[in-house]
Image: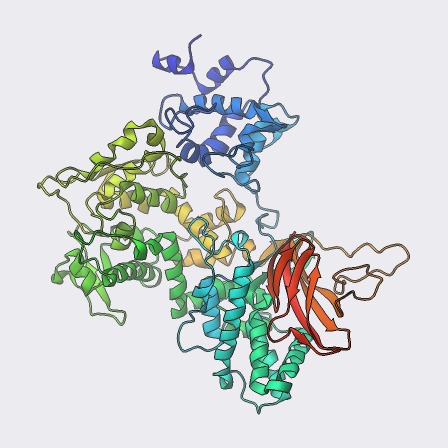
């Protein structure tokens, strides 16, 4: 019997349906539209770009049962469907290999790493495909999972949560909260965040360990001391207990971004009184400030809302004030936002849009725009990019800084003054650069078209210079290159992943990644021909190298060099493969940017990246919110400012889903305990437990189904002074604690007091808190 490849070679013409009919027996499990399901929900979204890199003839996974034909080869879709169908039928302990391998849950692991999260839409569709193939009853009636919107238009993945401030947000918030004259540097001392899809604010990737807790404690103490130097900015009353209460209420409301509860005020008054009694008024306020800066109310942004019925929660006006301020300014709300939140004027679409436009027009939005661009285009690599000093002695730190400033300035100009269209980022025939950078580029002085601005840059006209658009900027070209020469791999990968949102897997382990020695007389692309010859490399590099070859007229540091050392013209022809709306050939960076400027693929990816950045989600281009935002982007003439305003108009901005927390079921013969006052350990009918002379009571601060926060009160029930240390059983995984340090032990979590609350006199109390995920 002829194989499928032989049939293709002989020119046998089968339609997809005829081929599948011929190759599938009548008693085979499956559904009539399995091929289409495979194409739209598995092959195009992930397998054609991520799996094909290893699972191809000669690839790292060539010896496995799944060897795929690359996109574009005759019969690739049908062949790959049959291959994947066979894998779906293979099971381990009742679970299809099609699910175990890409999710990284196979006992032997997966060479390509974890490509599909079990909670993702893609995994759900892989599961549905396996069910179809294996004849699970009702599977043929299951449609692809698209994360369809609820009847109210809400994204089902919009869960209630607490979002921890990033280091960027933390520093901005401290600067504004403490009225600092210069930018805060304390956040830079904290451990860095995990980066997902280029961004550092993905909520699910944030976790608090002991190192971060220790750093936060140190920083909080230092920041509190600095705050006392500007105490007159916070309160103007005469020192004393009454003024301390004013400070607690006013400073606390700004720090927590919402009014304090009476219980909060009482707790901080008690702390103030205990410290002030020994160390005086200022030290008492300093202790209160440090404690507030360690509170979850400061470190986390609340997205919990109030229950509206059917598991839907509406964010409060104060929560929405923070949503707006951290989206547009990367910092806490200003006085106007606080005033509108207090008046209940921040919940209608019109009110939110008006504030969004006000905040975007403010100079305070510039750092946020810069932060987005730096992460979106991977500009952080520029500072660490190594260059050969014997070749590029003039590539100085000043040039690096000027390159980054150029990219940030162009983006800011397009958003604020240049019409706002996304396509202008790629087609701009001008730039904003310092004289130093213009000289480095070799731009003639006659192309300068404006006075030098306060930031040291001016407008330069670029027609005829070989430059124009973001992808000709040195910040991108130099950061995506080797120390000696341009790198079509790195530059092509940047386009593929950051502009088309098509992530690629890392190189298979064990491959020799060394390239031939550099010959300045030969085209750079010839050094990379090994990628196309070696089957282990070709499948993946076809997705990168042909795009990267279009950058060949720019060297390792971003200078335009259209000729080789021997005078031969550089071949800058390139091609985009496997991106339906953007496929085709082009010449040079200008030709590449012309293709990208009006590409629906790029437009969808750009809006998806803003969704990830704004909402702190990993993002899925099939999700409800992503679809809503992409449609609004196109309806808004592809305007970047309108895209940002649209982020505030989605139901996801104002609403969340969450489980309804029920009252505890009372034990027969006892009274029910309200959820606001649940002892930390022991039976609810007994008095609060004691530990080493310490009495403990716990109150639920927040509970959002997937996690919770508890406040704990520790009281010295003995007759002698002591330094308290207690051990609690904590349900789930602890991810934050404030006003205490902690250590996980075999008996639970051991909490210990900090400097200002660890020592208790008889009858004295201290409070701390913690949050955990279930």
Place of residue 200 in the rendered image (x, y in percent of width and height, measured from the top left): 45, 55
User: Which residue sits at x=33%, y=27%?
Assistant: 535
Which quadrant holds the N terminus?
top left
> Residue lying furthest bottom in this view?
238
Q: Is residue 216 above or below residue 557?
A: below
> Residue lying furthest right in this view?
669
Residue 354 in view here: no
Give the quadrant of residue 523: top left
Q: Is residue 42 above or below residue 173?
A: above
- On the rendered structure, is 706 left or right of 697? left
188, 266: nearer the viewer: 188
Place of residue 216 in the rendered image (x, y in percent of width and height, measured from the top left): 52, 66
Q: Is residue 616 above or below residue 586?
A: below
- On the rendered structure, is 405 left or right of 718? left
Residue 76 in view here: yes
- On the rendered structure, is 627 left or right of 770? left
Place of residue 110 in the rendered image (x, y in percent of width and height, measured from the top left): 49, 34
User: Which residue sits at x=52%, y=49%?
Assistant: 625
24, 631: nearer the viewer: 24
User: Which residue sits at x=44%, y=58%?
Assistant: 644
């Amino acid at each position: 019997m002829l194989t499928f490849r032989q049939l293709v070679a002989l020119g046998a013409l089968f339609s997809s349906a005829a081929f599948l009919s011929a190759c599938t027996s009548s008693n085979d499990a499956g559904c009539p539209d399995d091929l289409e399901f495979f194409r739209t929900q598995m092959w195009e979204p992930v397998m054609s770009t991520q799996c094909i890199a290893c699972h191809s003839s000669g690839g790292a996974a060539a010896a496995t049962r799944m060897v795929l034909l690359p996109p574009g080869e005759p019969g690739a879709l049908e062949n790959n469907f049959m291959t994947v169908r066979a894998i779906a039928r293979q099971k381990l302990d009742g679970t299809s290999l099609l699910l175990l391998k890409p999710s990284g849950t196979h006992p032997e692991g997966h060479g390509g790493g974890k490509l599909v999260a079990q909670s993702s839409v893609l995994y759900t569709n892989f599961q549905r495909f396996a069910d179809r193939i294996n004849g699970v009853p009702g599977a043929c009636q299951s449609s692809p999972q698209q994360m369809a919107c609820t009847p109210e238009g809400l994204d089902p993945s919009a869960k209630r949560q607490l979002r921890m401030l990033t280091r960027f947000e933390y520093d901005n918030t401290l600067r504004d909260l403490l009225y600092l004259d210069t930018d805060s540097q304390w956040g830079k001392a904290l451990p860095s965040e995990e980066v997902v899809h280029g961004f550092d604010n993905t909520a699910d990737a944030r976790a608090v360990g002991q190192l971060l807790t220790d750093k936060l404690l140190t920083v909080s103490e230092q920041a509190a001391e600095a705050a006392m130097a500007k105490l007159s900015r916070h309160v103007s009353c005469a020192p004393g207990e009454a003024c301390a209460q004013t400070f607690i209420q006013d400073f606390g409301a700004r720090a927590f971004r919402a009014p304090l509860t009476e219980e909060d005020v009482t707790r901080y008054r008690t702390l103030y009184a205990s410290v002030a009694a020994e160390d005086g008024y200022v030290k008492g306020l300093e202790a209160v400030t440090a404690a507030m800066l360690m509170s979850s109310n400061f470190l986390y942004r609340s997205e919990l809302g109030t229950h509206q019925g059917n598991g839907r929660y509406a964010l409060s006006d104060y929560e929405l004030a923070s949503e707006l301020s951290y989206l547009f300014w990367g910092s806490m709300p200003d006085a106007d936002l606080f005033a509108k939140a207090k008046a209940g004027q921040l919940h209608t679409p019109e009110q939110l849009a008006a504030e969004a436009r006000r905040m975007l027009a403010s100079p305070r939005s510039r750092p946020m725009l810069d932060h987005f661009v730096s992460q979106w285009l991977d500009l952080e690599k520029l500072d660490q990019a190594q260059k050969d000093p014997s070749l590029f002695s003039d590539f100085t730190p000043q040039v690096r800084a000027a390159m980054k400033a150029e990219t940030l300035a162009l983006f800011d100009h397009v958003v604020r003054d240049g019409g706002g269209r996304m396509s202008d980022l790629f087609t701009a025939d001008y730039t904003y650069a310092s004289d130093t950078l213009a000289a480095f580029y070799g731009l003639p002085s006659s192309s300068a078209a404006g006075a030098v601005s306060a930031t040291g840059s001016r407008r330069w006209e670029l027609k005829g210079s070989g430059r124009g658009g973001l992808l000709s900027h040195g910040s991108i070209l130099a950061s995506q290159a080797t120390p000696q020469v341009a790198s079509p791999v790195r530059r092509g990968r940047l386009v593929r992943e950051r502009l088309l949102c098509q992530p690629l897997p890392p190189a298979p382990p064990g491959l020799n990644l060394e390239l031939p020695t550099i010959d300045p007389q030969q085209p750079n692309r010839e050094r990379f021909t090994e990628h196309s010859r070696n089957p282990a490399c070709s499948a993946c590099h076809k997705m990168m190298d042909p795009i990267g070859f279009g950058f060949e007229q720019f060297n390792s540091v971003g200078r335009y060099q259209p000729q080789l050392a021997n005078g031969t013209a550089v071949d800058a022809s390139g091609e985009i493969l496997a991106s339906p709306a953007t496929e085709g050939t082009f010449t040079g960076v200008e030709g590449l940017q012309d293709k990208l400027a009006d590409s629906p693929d790029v437009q969808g990816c750009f809006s998806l990246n803003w969704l990830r950045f704004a909402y702190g989600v990993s993002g899925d281009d099939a999700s409800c919110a992503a679809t809503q935002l992409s449609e609004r982007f196109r309806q808004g003439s592809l305007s970047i400012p309108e895209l940002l305003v649209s982020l505030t108009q989605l139901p996801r901005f104002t609403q969340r889903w969450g489980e309804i927390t029920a009252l505890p079921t009372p034990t027969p013969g006892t009274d029910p305990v309200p959820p606001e006052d649940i002892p930390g350990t022991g039976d609810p009918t007994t008095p609060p437990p004691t530990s080493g002379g310490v009495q403990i009571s716990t109150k639920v601060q927040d509970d959002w189904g997937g996690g919770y926060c508890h406040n704990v009160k520790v009281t010295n029930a003995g007759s002698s002074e002591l330094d308290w240390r207690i051990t609690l059983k904590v349900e789930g995984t602890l991810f934050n604690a404030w006003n205490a340090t902690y250590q996980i032990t075999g008996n639970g979590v051991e909490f210990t007091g900090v400097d200002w609350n660890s020592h208790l006199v008889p009858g004295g109390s201290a409070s701390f808190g913690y949050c955990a995920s279930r």
